[in-house]
Amino acid sequence: MWETKLTDDFSVSALGLGCSSMSHGYGPGDRDDKESAGVLHRAVELGINLFDTADVYGPFANEELLGRTLEPYRGQVRIATKCGLVTRPDGRFARDGRPEHLRAACEASLRRLRTEAIDLYQLHRVDPEVPLAETWGALGELVTEGKVRTLGISHATKDELDQIHAVFPLTTVQYELSVWAPQARREILPWCRANGVGFLAFAPIGRGFLSGRLSHDHLFPGDSRTRDPRFHSDAMRANEAIVEGVRAVCARHEGSTPSQVAIAWVLAQGSDVVPIPGTRHLHWLEENVAATGLRLTDRDLAELDGLPTASGEMRWDSVRADGADQAVRPHPATDR
């Protein structure tokens, strides 16, 4: 697999691996750490060297899984984790951008990941109750101290990106980007290119929907997708038109799958864009990696760009975290 140069000093494999579903999001009943460890080992064998996680996934279990499984490969791989969200008793997320929280979160992530420095430390969401300069200044100090190598942000607005980048340079911006969620191409991706910042595209297969294998009946209680309007039954039926469009392109590439077409579309957005599809199953991992060999034609790209807007579409800067509604951080005395 080829290397993608996101910035002058940060290169990664053309495809990364989103690890959240191994421990979080789609229901704890399906969690299988042994199978997930096998997926992580195989990903390294296939040339993937970027693994994306967060302290809130599990919570904590996903970092622990990556820490013990990827420890033998620490010289070969880059682990990207996130901070700035906490899980509330009701299961929803709350933002916490206070410097003291971020410093404590970093120390805890270092222990769980079994590393002396985090390769890419990302702020999961901006906390509107904390001045952005304070939050980002604290993260910059972690780089200066050698506890973090580079910094990234997930789902910040263009104005917030300007503020952040002025305090301490960004290495990556992470956003949802796929055939049914192309909104980041309007402002965020152009901002990244104008500022020499890499782009990590999560959910390139539309949280599984673009694979063509998912129906509303497959969503169980506890699955975070049930809180996403695009996965409500009526919306899913309407959004089948998008899947059919992906299938039509797939039919012109013998041996390809809709998931591979969806990933190839993201790869075609530019050499500074790295898709990080998530999976906890070996066969889907191998299918996703094979997408790096699929080249879409101009006709393919034009058809995919012309597909209908997703029914139930959420705003590109919506207040969400991995499919779940997110509440602003409550009073410090009650947010633990």
Image: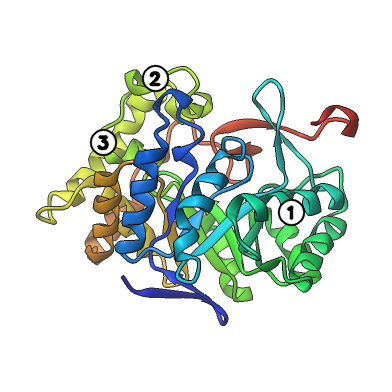
Image quadrant where residue 95 sits: top right
Horizontal side of residue 174 vs 48, given as left or right: right
Tag of residue 212: 3
Q: Marks 2 and 1, Cα distance to the nearest angstrom?
A: 42 Å
Quadrant holding the N terminus: bottom left
Q: Marks 1 and 3, Cα distance to the nearest angstrom?
A: 41 Å
Within 10 Å of the Cα at label 1, are there few (<14), some (14-19), or many (20+) other Cα atoms? some
- Residue occupying the point 43% across, 73% down: 4
Within 10 Å of the Cα at label 3, are there few (<14), some (14-19), or many (20+) other Cα atoms? some
Secondary structure, mark 2, is helix
Give how far across and how far down residue 226 sits, in percent. Answer: 48, 23
The amino acid at mark 2 is Ser
Give how far across and how far down residue 134 sits, in percent. Answer: 87, 57
Contact between marks 2 and 1 (CB within 8 A): the answer is: no
Q: Earlier in the sequence, mark 2 or mark 1?
A: 1
The residue to which callout 1 is attached is: 107
Secondary structure, mark 3, is loop
Image quadrant where residue 238 sits: top left
- Residue occupying the point 66% across, 52% down: 111
Horizontal side of residue 131 vs 9, given as left or right: right
Give how far across and how far down residue 190 sits, in percent. Answer: 56, 67
Horizontal side of residue 153 vs 303, given as left or right: right
